[in-house]
Amino acid sequence: MKLPFHITLGVVRWLHSQGYNNISVVGMCLGGTVAGLIAAQEEKVDKAVLMVSPGSPADLVWTAETMKSLRDRIEPVMSLEDLRIAWSLINLEMHMFGLTRPRLDMMFVLGNDDTITRPAASDRVIELLTKCNRSPEVLRLNCGHSSVGIFPYNIIAARKVLRFLKETPTLAELWDIRGFRYDFSEV
């Protein structure tokens, strides 16, 4: 389900008001950019997964095969740099302060053969995060944009994303799951 930015932000705040303390946002393509923007703006978000998402929608318009007709209409009056400036508010590179805050973990899922959201556009965001000592988890699949949702890539991505989103249980919780009882407070 695709929700506009302000509604998604409202959902995050409502979930927190209902007592949910571990909130994650996940999005694909432009939805991933929106997930990144929400994570940058809302401190209640703990984890963000951006799947085949452009760091800047301007780069998507400029390089995606599917956006060629739009680029052809824009290019006579505006350069890529002009478009980046015009859309800087929705460019993840301009939100590094929020994206590098403590308690925010990020994951990127990229398709090495993606001709819609070129991996290089996400790599710039990943590089900036890394320079700020906030290295995100990165999964690179040998597939294209839409094929992230096709077997076997969908299974690989789902497994890694779910592992990333799941909190690691404590030793005591693992013992409880296996039916053992031990008072770890005495250790």
Image (spheres, grey):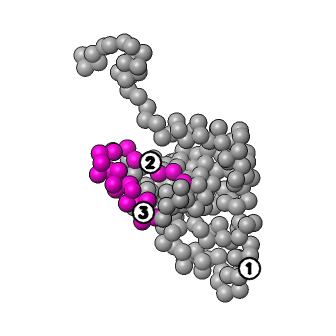
Foreground mark, 1 or 3, reads 3
The tag earlier along the polypeptide, 1 or 2, is: 2
Residue at mark 2: 24
Q: Which region of the structure is painted magenta?
A: 5-27
Left or right of 118, for residue 106: left
Residue at mark 1: 72
x, y percent for residue 83: 60, 77
Q: Residue at x 32, y 50 (%)?
A: 16
Q: Which quadrant of the figure has residue 179?
A: top left
Q: Residue 7: give its label.
A: 3
Picture quarter with the C terminus = top left
Under tag 1, what secondary structure? Answer: helix
x, y percent for residue 58: 61, 71
Under tag 2, what secondary structure? Answer: strand
Looking at the image, residue 57 lies above or below residue 74: above
Task: Residue type at mark 3: give it.
Answer: Ile
Mark 2, residues whose alpha carbon is within 10 Å: few (<14), some, or many (≥20)? some
x, y percent for residue 110: 64, 50
Residue at the front extreme?
1
- Does the segment drawn in magenta span residue 100? no
Q: How far apart, in angstroms, are the residues tagged by discs 1 and 3? A: 32 Å
The tag earlier along the polypeptide, 1 or 3, is: 3
Q: How far apart, in angstroms, are the residues tagged by discs 3 and 2? A: 15 Å
